[in-house]
Amino acid sequence: MRRLGSRLGITAAALYWHIKSRHDVLLLAADTVWGQIPLPALDGLEWRPALLAVADNLRSMFLRHPWMPAAMTIQPLDGPARDRHDEHLLAVCEASGLTRRDAEQAAQSVVTFAIGAALAAAPRPYVSFGLRSLLDGVEAGLAARI
């Protein structure tokens, strides 16, 4: 908090006037980062390209902010922007025809995949191939239900 205060040109005590704890600083920073992720329009949505775009945007965000995955493993960093992102991702998954439960699992898989790809610093072609393979499995499961 002292370093942050110093960077802002204020004392740590002045910072605590506005923010209660280090955790609150992380929540605000994480929410700002989540809010910067572009979300594909839901109108006329094709779910596969939309999920590929969401995963790529997540991977890019985690590459730009490498502190996020580590911070997320230590404590929950949920806020309004993360909630908006998660609900949007869930809507994209449900647009495929998945049940709510399966859509939740697919959405979590996409997020996990994006985090793993960012941590591995995997080049985009490998990420796209891996995610397309994952989505092939989702599509095969959908076809089997019909």
Image (cartoon, grey):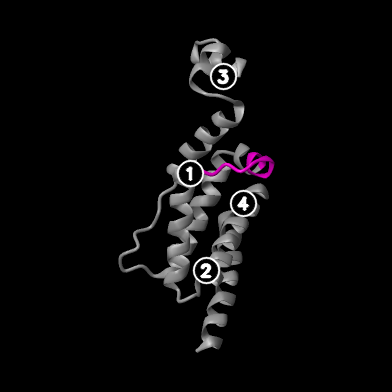
Q: Mark 4 highlights which residue?
A: 115
| Residue placed under numbered mark 1 in the picture | 34
Which mark is in front, 2 or 4?
2
Whole-percent x, y for residue 101 in the image: 55, 70
Point 54% across, 62% down: residue: 107
Relative to 14, is 122 above or below? below
Q: How far apart are labels 3 and 1 at the CA level? A: 21 Å
Please state the horizontal and vertical placement of residue 125, each as a whole percent of the image: 57, 60
Tell which circle, 2 or 4, labels the residue nearer the N-terminal end.
2
Residue position for label 3: 4
User: Please, is residue 117 above or below residue 142 in the view?
Assistant: above
Kind of residue sitting beneath label 1: Trp
Residue assigned mark 2: 103
Residue type at the position of mark 3: Leu
SS category of the residue bearing label 2: helix
Q: Amino acid at mark 4?
A: Ile
Instruction: Please report whichever mark, 3 or 1, sits nearer to the chain's N-terminal start.
Output: 3
